């Protein structure tokens, strides 16, 4: 009996093992692990500008290293400095502020007097000078102080209409006083007048003074044209006419009438 019991147990054990094996064989296979997904996007994806690198300047096909392009400041020729501010046009070719005019040229001057019905004249050509300084008091209107002179070399001396030999070799006529000038629009044509205290001197050929006059009055009228050559400088030409009256220093009863005409070149700052 015992052997039969053991045999039954053994058969039962075998049957259990076989059933278990069959159950395991019929169970579905476990699902495979999921395939790894595509790589996660980078935290800061590179921009298109970073992905496409510009071609370096000065690229060479001969194996030399490429050099980087110049910075924008160098590329525009500025060397890193800002461009200078544009020049102001205020005061450009305009008569304003301080005024200075210097003139030189050629002239003709004469002196005449009458004594006991006999007229004596002295006159001739020479050099002429002038200078004026002042300022603008209104649009194109200038107030100035002027100094002018006309020198006559080897004047012709006539008495009663007849030329006479004379020791006079040089006559100098000078005037100083206030004046006013006005410039006409864009053509830069001006008209000026000066009321001056005037005097003349006569010298011999060696430069020794022979005679002189007392201080008298004269009037100078001038018309001129100037061309701008810079922001404030102008060059021009002018005609000057002067008339005056002066008494003789040695003979107070003798009055001299003076006249002068000059053609001048001028340089004016304004």
Image (cartoon, rainbow, N blue to C red):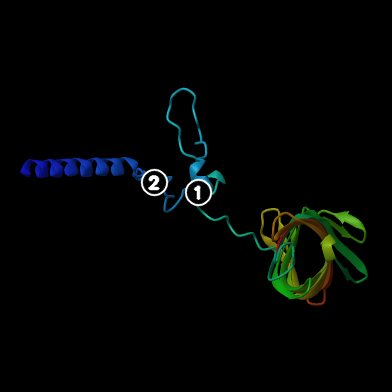
Which label number is shown at residue 74?
none
Label 1: which residue?
A: 47
Residue 246 % position (x, y): 80, 73
Which label number is shown at residue 34?
2
Between 256 and 96, the residue placed more toward the observer is 96
Neighbours of disc 2 within 10 Å: few (<14), some (14-19), many (20+) = few
The local secondary structure at tag 1 comes to loop
* Image quadrant in which the N terminus is located: top left
> Where is residue 192, by image quadrant?
bottom right
**Sequence-wise, which precedes: disc 1 or disc 2?**
2
Farthest-out residue, front: 1
Farthest-out residue, top: 62
Residue 236 % position (x, y): 78, 56
Please indicate, yes or no, whether residue 253 appears anywhere in the rendered image. yes
What residue appears at the point 26 percent right and 43 percent down from the top-left corner? 19
Q: Seen in the image, is 170 located left or right of residue 222?
A: left
When the figure is inspected, residue 254 is found, relative to residue 36, above or below; the finding is below
Residue 16 % position (x, y): 22, 44
Between 22 and 73, the residue placed more toward the observer is 22
* Image quadrant in which the C terminus is located: bottom right
The local secondary structure at tag 2 comes to loop
Which is more foreground, mark 1 or mark 2?
A: 2
Between 176 and 188, the residue placed more toward the observer is 188
């Amino acid at each position: 009996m015992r052997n039969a019991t053991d045999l039954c147990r053994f058969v039962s054990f075998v049957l259990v093992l076989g059933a278990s094996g069959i159950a395991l064989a019929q169970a579905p296979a476990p699902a495979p692990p999921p395939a790894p997904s595509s790589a996660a996007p980078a935290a800061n994806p590179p921009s298109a500008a970073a992905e496409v690198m510009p071609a370096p300047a000065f690229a060479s096909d001969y194996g030399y290293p490429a050099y980087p392009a110049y910075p924008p400041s160098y590329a525009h020729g500025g060397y890193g400095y800002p461009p200078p501010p544009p020049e102001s046009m205020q005061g450009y070719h305009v008569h304003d502020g301080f005024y200075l005019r210097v003139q030189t040229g050629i002239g003709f001057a004469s002196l005449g007097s009458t004594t006991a019905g006999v007229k004596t004249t002295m006159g001739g050509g020479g050099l002429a000078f002038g200078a004026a300084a002042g300022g603008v008091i209104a649009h194109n209107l200038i107030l100035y102080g002027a100094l002018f002179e006309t020198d006559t070399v080897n004047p012709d001396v006539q008495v009663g209409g007849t030329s006479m030999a004379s020791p006079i070799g040089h006559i100098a006529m000078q005037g100083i006083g206030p004046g006013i000038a006005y410039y006409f629009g864009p053509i830069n044509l001006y008209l000026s007048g000066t009321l001056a205290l005037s005097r003349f001197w006569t010298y011999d050929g060696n430069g020794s003074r022979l005679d002189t006059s007392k201080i008298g009055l004269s009037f100078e009228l001038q018309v001129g044209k100037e061309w701008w050559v810079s922001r404030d400088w102008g060059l021009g030409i002018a005609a000057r006419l002067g008339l005056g009256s002066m008494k003789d220093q040695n003979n107070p009863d003798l009055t001299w009438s003076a006249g002068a005409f000059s053609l001048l070149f001028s340089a004016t700052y304004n």
